[in-house]
Image (tube, rainbow, N blue to C red):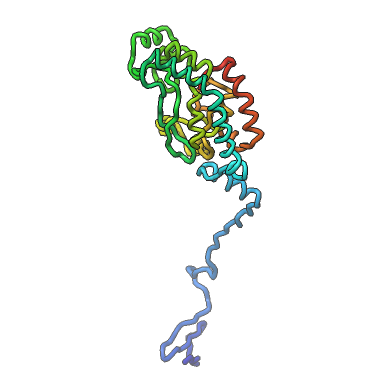
Amino acid sequence: MLVHPDNSPSGSSADVIDGTAVDVDARPTAHARPAYDAVTVVAAPRTVSEDEKATIARLQAQVDGTDRPDGVYVKVVKPALDRLAGGLLLLLTLPLLLAGMLAVRMTMGRGVIFRQERIGLNGRRFTVLKLRTMGHDRRSTSQKDLEALAEGRWDGIERRQTHKTDADPRHTAVGRTLRKLSIDELPQLINVVRGDMSLVGPRPELPVVINRHYEPWMHRRHAVKPGVTGLWQISMRGEGDMHEHVDVDLDYVDRVSLREDLRILFATPFAALGAHKGV
């Protein structure tokens, strides 16, 4: 109960709440607390447009590797054409392939087909097939290797990056001819018929190269099947290492289409027989 007594001190007022006197002097003191609290001013967040959101989502999807080509051509037409055209090309080039296999058998003995693990669609591992162009002891260092290293014809440091060059001393004479004519790549038509590869796409890389050199955004090249030939081969065939030109493969991923595939297929023989050889 609130009571106002008549004998309040001069210059002040007092209330009694349930028998307890409470000073309610209205005069402020020197240390009185201000009647307000500090207010922190926070800027209103900037409105992000729908176009900006779409761009951010697309870039993030590219980094995550989830931005993948879609559509009827990629899902249905391209795989069907690969198997059909790949099988037809395998039959047409079979005499050439058999001749190459015979030449390898006569000069290098058993083990005509070279098998190597590569990375394919969605990062899946598969075995790529090629005609052997090096001796079976290609990982050992021979006297010819040392001579080539001394003469500056071979760097000898990273064999994976140098075995494509014509000057590599590990290639046999027959192997150089097969590479010059790209006959050593013909067994990969079997990979195409199997469904491991496409006629056109990024070249399949070695797992060790991907583990050593690839950044997250570079894995987007695995959003499509690796190819027997591709944009990198016809644009800068044999120049530099594949992992240094992933941006070229990503350009292909961005614009994969029937027209682009036909353009690359048509240009491949000219690139294969031109100034730059072997991939």
Q: Give residue 153's position: percent from left, percent from top.
A: 44, 10
For residue 156, what is the image quadrant?
A: top left
Q: Give residue 60's position: percent from left, percent from top.
A: 54, 45
Q: Is residue 246 visible?
A: no
**Towards the viewer: 4 or 70:** 70
Q: Residue at x 54, y 68 (%)?
A: 36
Q: Is residue 257 visible?
A: yes
**Towards the viewer: 239 or 176:** 176
Q: Is residue 231 above or below residue 253?
A: above
Q: Residue at x 62, y 28 (%)?
A: 264
**Towards the viewer: 126 or 54:** 126
Q: Is residue 162 above or below residue 244?
A: above
Q: Residue at x 45, y 15 (%)?
A: 175
**Towards the viewer: 187 or 24:** 187
Total marks shown come to: 0
Q: Residue at x 57, y 19 (%)?
A: 272
Q: Give residue 184's position: percent from left, percent from top.
A: 48, 21
Residue 84 in the figure: left or right of residue 160? right
For residue 71, what is the image quadrant?
A: top right
Q: Is residue 20 above or below residue 112?
A: below
Q: Give residue 121's position: percent from left, percent from top.
A: 49, 39
